[in-house]
Image (tube, rainbow, N blue to C red):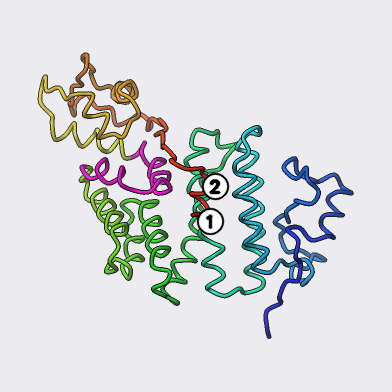
């Protein structure tokens, strides 16, 4: 049986537009009635999702992604948590339409990358939000669903014309899961490719796995901004492990380490954050130095969550859409 093909040429099917307007379900980001976007909907009795007139063909899906990430993502006068929830829901609807129509691997390779980059950016942007405002685990779940799918596509249908995209996605998967042996195993078929980005990602992940944190600062600053986003949310755990490791290695009474150098190693924005981190783990700070002592290090306290500032050289929408 052939998959159904969508014939809806609007971002939102007419019947949904009429229904949501009548029930006052129009989102505040849909103030323009001509720019409403189809909601994600779960299949239920009487709710058939495979009707051609409510399915958008791949060209419309791609245009909708561009609209969401070009025009909605860049809005600044509305809290980002509201923008995130809206875009996340509409991207889920796009993936749903594509799945129902069984779009080709080539179409998926156009649809999934901006969605993956969006979730990577959101992980960083919403890092300090309360869990009731932003669910980092659900965001990571959506990220993994999309990136594992595209990696499987690269394994099935590898084409040299998509080399750069493949290298970006595989390396992004690796650095999102630093030190994860299972992810490295899944990336094995791509490690032999001549990609500097994949080599850096693998080296960093192996270094973290083996407790060698020296490559973190060196490699982090050479990676694209999207890769830095997903590493930044792992920094609380990494910083804790780095400090603990240094307290073991440098352990000696009255052995003080310069705060300025430690700030670079821990990827903090400023020395005041490094001092706060050290004091959080009960290490003694003396002026511009800290005493690294395994007897002082408190392993019982929770990780300290301090956001790493990332400089975006261009508009975020251009990074997410890769334009």
Q: Is 258 left or right of 174, judged from the image as shown? A: left
Question: What is the quadrant of residue 183 in the picture?
Answer: bottom left
The dominant secondary structure in magenta is: helix
Q: Considering only vertical position in the picture, is 232 above or below 297?
A: below
Q: Is 260 left or right of 269, judged from the image as shown? A: left
Q: How crowded is mark 1: few (under 14 residues within 10 Å), some or many (20 or more)?
A: many
Name the secondary structure under disc 1.
helix
Name the secondary structure under disc 2.
helix
Give percent across and percent down for residue 53.
Answer: 79, 69
Q: Nearer the viewer, residue 63 or 137?
A: 63
Give percent across and percent down for residue 200.
Answer: 27, 54
Residue in view at x 43 percent, y 69 percent: 162
Q: Residue furthest right?
A: 22
Give percent across and percent down for residue 288.
Answer: 21, 17
- The segment highlighted magenta reads 214-237
Q: Considering only vertical position in the picture, is 193 above or below 142?
A: below
Give percent across and percent down for residue 21.
Answer: 86, 48
* Disc 2: which residue: 317
* Disc 1: which residue: 114
Q: How far apart are marks 1 and 2 (CA)?
A: 9 Å
Q: Quadrant of the N terminus?
A: bottom right
Question: What is the quadrant of residue 254 in the picture?
Answer: top left
Q: Is 117 left or right of 66, judged from the image as shown? A: left
Question: What is the quadrant of residue 249 in the picture?
Answer: top left
Q: Residue furthest bottom?
A: 1
Q: Considering only vertical position in the picture, is 71 above or below 181?
A: above
């Amino acid at each position: 049986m052939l998959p159904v093909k969508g014939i809806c040429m609007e971002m939102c099917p007419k019947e949904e537009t009429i229904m949501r307007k009548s029930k006052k379900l129009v989102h505040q980001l849909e103030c323009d009635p001509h720019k409403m976007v189809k909601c994600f909907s779960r299949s239920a009795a009487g709710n058939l999702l495979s009707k051609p007139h409510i399915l958008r063909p791949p060209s419309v899906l791609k245009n909708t992604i561009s609209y969401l990430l070009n025009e909605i993502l860049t809005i600044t006068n509305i809290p980002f948590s509201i923008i995130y929830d809206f875009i996340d829901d509409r991207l889920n609807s796009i993936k749903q339409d594509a799945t129902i129509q069984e779009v080709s691997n080539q179409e998926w390779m156009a649809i999934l990358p901006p969605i993956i980059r969006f979730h990577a950016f959101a992980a960083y942007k919403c890092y300090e939000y309360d869990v009731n405002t932003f669910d980092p685990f659900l965001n990571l779940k959506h990220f993994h669903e999309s990136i594992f799918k595209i990696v499987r596509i690269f394994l099935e249908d590898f084409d040299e014309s998509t080399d750069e995209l493949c290298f970006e996605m595989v390396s992004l998967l690796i650095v999102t899961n630093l030190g994860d042996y299972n992810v490295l195993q899944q990336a094995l078929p791509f490690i032999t490719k001549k990609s500097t980005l994949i080599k850096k990602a693998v080296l960093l992940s192996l270094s973290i796995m083996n407790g060698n944190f020296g490559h973190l600062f060196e490699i982090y600053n050479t990676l694209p901004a999207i890769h830095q986003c997903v590493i930044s949310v792992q920094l609380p755990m990494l910083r804790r492990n780095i400090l603990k490791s240094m307290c073991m290695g440098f352990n000696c009474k009255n052995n003080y380490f310069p705060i300025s150098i430690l700030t670079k190693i821990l990827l903090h924005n400023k020395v005041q954050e490094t001092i706060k981190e050290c004091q959080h783990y009960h290490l003694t700070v003396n002026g511009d130095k800290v005493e690294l002592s395994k007897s002082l290090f408190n392993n019982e306290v929770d990780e300290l969550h301090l956001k790493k500032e990332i400089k975006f050289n261009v508009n975020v929408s251009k990074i997410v859409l890769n334009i």
